[in-house]
Image (spheres, helix red, strand yellow):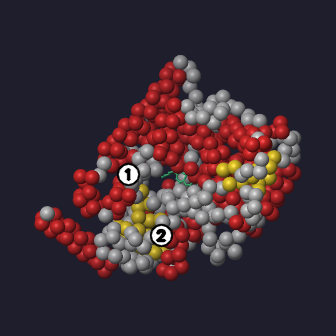
Amino acid sequence: MGLTLIILASIILILILYSLFQRLRYKIPPGPKPWPVVGNLYDIKPVRFRCFYEWAQQYGPILSFRLGSKLNVVVSNAELAKQVLKEYDQNLADRHRSRSSAKFSKDGKDLIWADYGPHYVKVRKACTLELFTQKRLEALRPIREDEVTAMIDTLFRDCTNPENKGKPLKVRRYIGAVSFNNITRLTFGKRFINSKGELDPLGKEFKAILSGGRTNKMGFLSEHLPWLRWILMPFDKEKIETAKHNARLDRFTREIMDEHTKAKLQGGAKNHFVDALLRIKEEYELSEDTIIGLLWDMVIAGMDTVSISVEWALAELIRNPRVQKKAQQELDRVIGNQRIMTEEDFSSLPYLQALAKESLRLHPPTPLMLPHKAKTHVKIGGYDIPKGTIVYVNVWGLGRDPNVYPNPEEFRPERFFEVDIDMKGQDFRLLPFGAGRRICPGTQLGINLVTSMLGHLLHHFDWNPPNGMKPEEINMKEDPGIVTYMSNPLQAIPVPRLPADLYKRVPADM
Ligand code: HEM
């Protein structure tokens, strides 16, 4: 016991001395004063991007804080975002892996959690040249159109069901199904949900794997206070749980990979991500761990982001009936009421595109992107960023900069006709997909899905708040987390506005 206390006290002393040494040696960005040992762990409010936004008003557009002894830096304006994601992109393109992401990614054998280095460059190249090509995006379009029209079909049936008369629907259920089915079909070539909306046994296993492996409270604390790990070691079941989770995930994915390999041998090769990765396995020297990691990266990064974006956008459209009406007028003018919208119509629907952009400005689903890490020491905004620092760009804050966006809280798609701002990583004033080396590889796919879902939802239905609720009373509170869901899932009443024969699913057998 005595020895443990001495070791503990020595570790704490070393950490305090190290932190003092760093403060004297470097010009660290300003920020809230850290407490000994825990740093600012208890100063940070759960909705982090809001907390960093408030801190930026006090400390300026580059600020720092500590989690335990770990230095974190947040930048909150376009000029500094450009320094992080363009000028010093290569130095700041490593990933900070939490203990759980390190374990689940087998220490960065995938793409999302890999550091920037030869492995990352190889895997990223495979993604760019083989998975996210324009050709594949186009080839997989029938899946997207199938899923979006399936959503419209179910929504129509539910909202015209006499039992549901006057009742609001929980929109997330419908939007979430599109994202879910789209991503499982795109990656694994599987639709785990039958036409009645029920999960098949494989789908149940998939969902169980997805929801498994969350970090518990003990895990969260010991993440930032490494010494706590030693003390809690006898009670910490995380290691065993992670091993079980990884084995389950590997087994599930291998079975699907085997199925696709067999189908290929029998001449039935398909065009899904799993097929593409198995085909290029040798050429790119991809290990099985990397292929499995990549497939799950797509699921994790591509599923929630899309449905979150659409839910926020629809909430804004209900709160702003003027914008909803204007978008519908455009759809009626371009498409009319004799056919449904397709992705080919996008270029004739500039207002629809602008409203998707406006929503991603106000509600980027990953408001702090994913944490980057400094590979080497750099200077940003005149401050030192020592090697190993975790670096965030507050994308949510960038979208609210009043110097760039007058009346930033106003939902007004027209602003993008007045100033031309790109959202695909070329313009640092708007970065829902990030920029630079680590920009989201699914950018175009994400934009297509979000725009398509919004276009169909608006063309087919008028959207109203629940009876008795004023549009402006919709609760826009955010949930904490790396991805930002609406805290109160959107409830709304859709009213069909097209002839009944246009609400049928357009199935695609692929
Ligand atoms: C509206 C939809 C989406 C948004 C807003 C979004 C946004 C982002 C952002 C901000 C990042 C982090 C960039 C960085 O750390 O610098 C990211 C990374 C990533 N996204 Fe997306 N994303 C979306 C959809 C998708 C889709 C549909 C896929 C794939 C099917 C996808 C796959 C990925 C992957 C694999 C990464 C990791 C890239 C890397 O670390 O190099 N995303 N995304």
- Type of residue at label 1? Ser
For this view, does 230 lie left or right of residue 96?
left
The quarter of the picture where the C terminus appears is top right
Residue displayed at 27% across by 61% down: 228
Q: Looking at this rendering, what residue extends furthest in the top direction?
A: 266
Tag count in the figure?
Answer: 2
| Above or below 376: residue 58 | below
**x, y percent for residue 150:** 70, 38
Q: Which numbered dot is residue 100?
A: 1
Cβ–Cβ under 8 Å for marks 1 and 2: no
State which mark lies toward you, 1 or 2.
2
**x, y percent for residue 97:** 39, 55
- In three-dimensional space, the C-alpha distance between marks 1 and 2, rounded to whole angstroms, equals 22 Å
The CB of the residue at mark 1 lies under 8 Å from ligand 1? no
| Above or below 344: residue 429 | below
> 10 Å neighbourhood of mark 2: few (<14), some, or many (≥20)?
few
Q: Name the residue under label 2.
A: 45
